[in-house]
Image (spheres, rainbow, N blue to C red):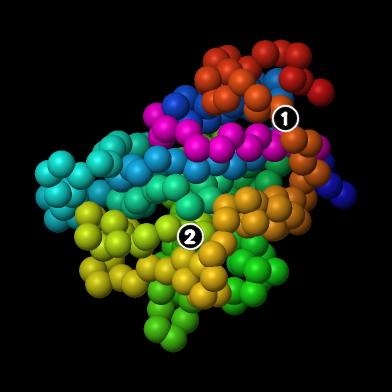
């Protein structure tokens, strides 16, 4: 039986502003003030460094490149975000979802595979690697990096919908993988694909995998409103 949750779709939001949103929502979820909440958005160009990043070997952003570089508290190594990429930040209380961080990551992978399937892209896991891939030859289409505090999750996944994948290889050693190949939904389908086209499939897959029935919250006032302490009136 599905449990209630919230869905917040914010459009394009700077990375640090979105991080503030996550922290505010995570505090409210942790206190039981609001149910599990899914945030979907895009970011302007940004390179994020996970806790396992080795900047000396992974970071090679050219001088003058129009990209922000942000150190984060998520797991994993370095990755790139930009417009044309669907970013999902699930703010979930894992006490309701098995108290198993590894299984949570597998569930995110399953949700990504379920997002891609109705779009006509057959994706899978690769043993020993996090994220979602296409095979023959292996090419990565989605990255995952999470943080869990008091069983409440932040950060999440980034799905390459329709963007230039060059920054993954030119600016960083993405995910710490030398010579890794990256792809997008648009490249695989050989047609333009918008983030708006992918979003409903992402929502449906997340609802199915995590047993949620999501109620969309209004986002007319942008991310700034949600970066503030979440008002108790949102509680069910």
Q: Is residue 6 left or right of residue 192?
A: right
> Which quadrant holds residue 70?
top left
| Residue span colored magenta | 4-16
Residue 202 sits above or below residue 190 on the image: above
Residue at screen point 14% across, 49% down? 62
Relative image position of residue 202 (x, y in whole percent): 65, 54
As drawn, the residue found furthest toward the right would be 1
Q: Which secondary structure type mostly characterizes the magenta part of the structure?
A: strand
Residue 39, given in percent of the width and then of the height, sits at 60, 38
- Looking at the image, which residue is at 59% across and 76% down? 122
Residue 217's disc number: 1
Q: Residues within 10 Å of mark 1 (few under 14, many from 20)?
A: some
Q: Does residue 134 appear left or right of residue 45 in this picture?
A: right
- Classify 222 as above or below 233: below
**Residue at x 50%, y 37% (from the top left corner):** 12
- The Cα atoms of the two marked residues, 1 and 2, are separated by 26 Å
**Quadrant of res 191:** bottom right
Q: Residue at x 74, y 51 (%)?
A: 207
Q: Secondary structure at mark 2?
A: loop
Q: Considering depth in this image, is 159 or 102 the residue closer to the camera?
A: 159
Locate residue 22 relative to residue 73 in the image: left or right. Answer: right
> Residue 128 colored magenta?
no
In the picture, the disc for residue 162 is: 2
Position of 169 relative to 13 (above/below): below
């Amino acid at each position: 039986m599905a449990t209630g949750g919230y869905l917040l779709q914010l459009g394009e939001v700077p990375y640090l502003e979105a991080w503030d949103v996550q922290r505010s929502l995570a505090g409210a979820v942790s206190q039981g003030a609001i149910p599990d909440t899914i945030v979907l958005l895009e970011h302007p160009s940004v390179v994020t460094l996970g806790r396992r990043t080795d900047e000396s070997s992974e970071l090679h952003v050219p001088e003058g490149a129009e990209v922000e570089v942000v150190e984060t508290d998520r797991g994993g190594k370095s990755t790139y975000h930009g417009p044309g990429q669907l970013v999902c930040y699930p703010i979930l209380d894992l006490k309701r979802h098995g108290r198993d961080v590894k299984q949570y990551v597998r569930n995110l992978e399953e949700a990504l595979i379920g997002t891609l399937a109705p779009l006509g892209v057959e994706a899978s896991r690769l043993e020993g690697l996090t994220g979602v891939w296409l095979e023959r030859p292996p090419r990565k289409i989605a990255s995952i990096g999470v943080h869990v505090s008091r069983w409440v999750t932040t950060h999440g996944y980034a799905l390459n919908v329709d963007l230039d994948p060059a920054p993954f290889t030119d600016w960083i050693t993405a995910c710490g993988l030398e010579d890794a190949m990256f792809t997008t939904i648009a490249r695989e389908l050989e047609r333009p694909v918008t983030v708006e086209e992918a979003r409903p499939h992402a929502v449906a897959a997340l609802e199915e995998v995590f047993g949620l029935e999501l109620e969309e919250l209004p986002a007319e006032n942008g991310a700034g409103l949600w970066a503030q302490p979440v008002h108790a009136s949102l509680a069910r």
